[in-house]
Amino acid sequence: MNDGGAVVMTFFMVRVLVVGAIMYAFPRIARKGLMFGVYLGEERAESSRRELLRSWDTGSALIILVALTVGWSIGLTGRWVPGNLIGTVFLLVPFVPLYFWVYAKARRLAPPAAARQALTSAASLSVDENRGQGLALLSLGACFVVSLAFFGYAIVSFQTMPDRIPTLANLWGYGEELTDKSLVSVILIPAFSLVFSTSFAGMAMLVARSKRSVRGGSGGRSAEAQDTFRVAMSQLLAGTGLFTCLFLGVASFEMIRVWQGRAESLGAAVIGLVAVTMILFTGIGLVRIMRLGQGGARLETGSAEARLSGGLADNDRWILGVMYVDRADPAVMVEARWGFGYTMNLGNRLAQVLLATYLTALLGLTLLTLAAAGVF
């Protein structure tokens, strides 16, 4: 296995471990009363917990086993990049039908009283101090400026490259082909940095400004827990944006050095160091989030007897337990029911514009990638 293959498959293994740990934790950190995106009511959720978790854990273990087998089977033939990509597809895609299956089981267990509870309870929804907003703003500005700087550097460097350069696959140890130099290939990684790093930082800003959804009648403990969680989530997103920008920037710089003939191979040690640091930061942040529980659920000790209220408890406002739609709610971001963090209110006009902008950027990146690969 060459250096490029080792880096690619290391990322694959880390990705499998991280995704597996996250999927294991998701249903275990939810707010009391919620199971797999469905509000069952506090008592019903507790009584149904074991059955639903058994279905989820069994399916998750099977998905991970299949993904590892597929990824390494392809990788050991020397096709490291396809092994990584195809193995990741087998890792991520099957979790969608698995979730829908367990969600349907949970939905059948939801009593009609749960919906009535949501309508009759008075939700406490507010935004007080936007703690964490300063770091998010700093991250957004830094990611935007640095990504543009790497973008400009790539364009300027294009003029100093020979007419024939190694392909992107060649740089990562898959094949030895040369191709005509292309400006699209040179700006591809900086373009990824511009979209993804600023997206993380932008989400950090939205999360820092999101409203909190506390338990009705539980006093200040639920509000305090929600504030702590909101700040931790915003900090994690802001830091991830900065590290994403740094990692993709370094990768772009190293690729340009190879294309210019100033280096024979990618600086695997440098890229690896940045990647490991990024993984450690993200891992520590995720552990912190898991310890807090979704929405600060594990900090709500003493207020657990109070029921969820408002939109978070109303099953009619959620599509498949993951998409929140309420045109009467002015909030752009609301606490997610499934997983951790926050989700957009798809009934909000600003949220719709932001989502459309992001999807357009992803489409642009897809077209750039296909062009760089010579598809058209």
Image (spheres, rainbow, N blue to C red):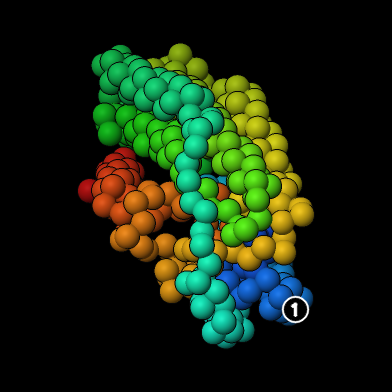
Residue 210, x across and y down, in percent = 46, 44
Quadrant of the rendering where the N terminus is positioned: top right
Please indicate whether residue 196 sits to the left or right of residue 290 in the image. Answer: left
- In the rendered image, which quarter is residue 268 located in? top right
Up-down relation of residue 249 to residue 76 (above or below)? above
- Say which of 10 and 312 sits in front: 312
Up-down relation of residue 46 to residue 339 (above or below)? below
Report the residue at 50% width, 72% height from top. 120
Report the residue at 51% width, 59% height from top. 123
Report the residue at 31% width, 61% height from top. 327
Residue 311, x across and y down, in percent = 47, 63
Up-down relation of residue 42 to residue 232 (above or below)? below
Report the residue at 58% width, 71% height from top. 39
Please indicate whether residue 356 sits to the left or right of residue 203 in the image. Answer: left
- Say which of 58 and 168 sits in front: 58
- Say which of 37 and 162 sits in front: 37
- Is residue 336 visible in the rendered image? The answer is yes
Say which amino acid is labelled 1: Ser
Residue 326, x across and y down, in percent = 36, 62
Residue 80, x across and y down, in percent = 57, 47
Please indicate whether residue 136 sits to the left or right of residue 190 in the image. Answer: right
